[in-house]
Image (cartoon, helix red, strand yellow):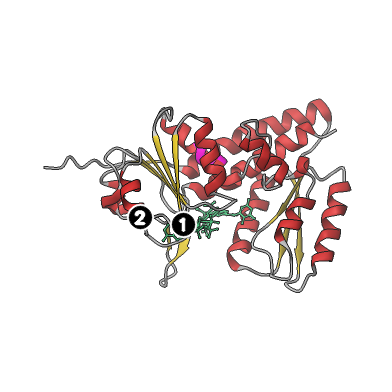
Amino acid sequence: MENLMTAKIINGKEIAAQVRAELKSEIQELKEKTGVTPGLTVVLVGENPASLVYVRNKIKACEEVGINSVQHKLPETTTHEELLGLIRQLNASKEVHGILVQLPLPKQINEEEILEEISPSKDVDGFHPYNVGRLMIGNPVLQPCTPYGVMRLLESTGVDLSGKDAVVVGRSNIVGKPMAMMLLKRNATVTVCHSKTKDLIERVKKADILVAAIGRAEFIKGEWVKEGAVVIDVGMNRTMEGKLVGDVDFEGASMRASFITPVPGGVGPMTIAMLLKNTVVAASRAK
Ligand code: NAP
Ligand code: L37
């Protein structure tokens, strides 16, 4: 008889609220001591429906904690030069401590070049090669929000990562790769899987810590999850019925994992909370 366990649910919504509460008092203190109010500018190009929701949530969260937020909504037809011009203007503004360009960008815009133009000290997404490099050498300043939030969720479980087998499925620059670096820094033994991985199921089955960042609804089956594993589901997929589901079969995985994140209410709210944190870090370091 298999010993089926029921996973504890990692409540991202609640932990994100805790992070925001901590930030709120940090921001008050910063204002009192230095007169500086952290400022975040979010740039949205076009009308990607998911991006519209996320950006709205980000602006709302800024208000709640006392960050000044400005939104630039540019048309789908914005040229590369126009967007570069806006970034240069924001780089030069003393009120702007954080600049976030919401991805994806329309195809006429060279994403890599745009991300490189953002001043590394204002790069609250942590996507500039400078900040990517800092993370790589293990001395990060501004860290990508989603994996940074995942680390906070892992901390909340009390599970010691040192020596554990961590498997990250997905190798994007915004989630999978930085996730691997952060887990490595915590002394996990990290495997990064992707669409060319030969023996994905065998590798997933060995994971003490499993992070799924694939973008395919319920791709990871419950039977692949090791007994007692910690499962973090970064995926955000909308089903044909309009339901939001992760990359992991939540029901099945819950019967084997020790801890698991739900979708929604897991990683998503943490992504936003860590953006606020990065903005406060950037504002505190601003000269
Ligand atoms: P992405 O850039 O599309 O990357 C997906 C990764 O998954 C790629 O590395 C890809 O491999 C891999 N992959 C695709 N199919 C696979 C398969 N059959 N087997 C193994 N690996 C496979 O996506 P992303 O930006 O990292 O996002 C991943 C998911 O997380 C999406 O659902 C996204 O919406 C969600 N997300 C959530 C948050 C949040 O805050 N909750 C934030 C960001 C993203 P290749 O490299 O070989 O193509
Ligand atoms: N920092 N994040 C940053 N920069 C970008 O350029 N694209 C992108 C990015 N991704 C992003 O914003 N992701 C994201 C994903 C989910 C949420 C927020 C941000 C989120 O709030 N998720 C909620 C549900 C939202 C919904 O109902 O659709 C959740 O509970 O998971």
Chief secondary structure of the magenta span?
helix
Residue behind mark 1: 214
Q: Amino acid at mark 2?
A: Ile
The residue sitting at 26% across, 42% down in the picture is 6
* Relative horizontal placement of residue 237, taking residue 47 as reference (left or right): left
Q: Alpha-carbon distance for marks 1 and 2?
A: 9 Å
Q: Is mark 1 within 8 Å of ligand 1?
A: yes
Are the residues tagged 1 and 2 within 8 Å (C-beta)? yes
Residue 274 locus on image (x, y percent): 61, 41
Residue closest to the eye, 240 or 148:
148
Residue closest to the eye, 84 or 89:
84
Q: Residue furthest top?
A: 33
The residue sitting at 62% across, 37% down in the picture is 136
Residue 287 sits in quarter: top right
* Relative horizontal placement of residue 65, taking residue 165 as reference (left or right): right
Ligand 2 sits in which quadrant?
A: bottom right
The residue sitting at 60% across, 44% down in the picture is 145
Magenta part of the chain: 148-152
Q: Is residue 189 magenta?
A: no
- Rendered-image quadrant of the N terminus: top left
Residue 262 locus on image (x, y percent): 41, 49
Mark 1, Cα crowd under 10 Å, few <14 / some 14-19 / many 20+, is: many
Q: Which mark is residue 220?
A: 2
Please say whether residue 16 is visible from this viewpoint: no
**Helix, strand or loop at disc 1?**
loop
Residue 135 locus on image (x, y percent): 63, 37
Which of disc 2 and disc 1 is earlier in sequence?
A: 1
* Relative horizontal placement of residue 251, taking residue 174 as reference (left or right): left
Residue 201 locus on image (x, y percent): 32, 52
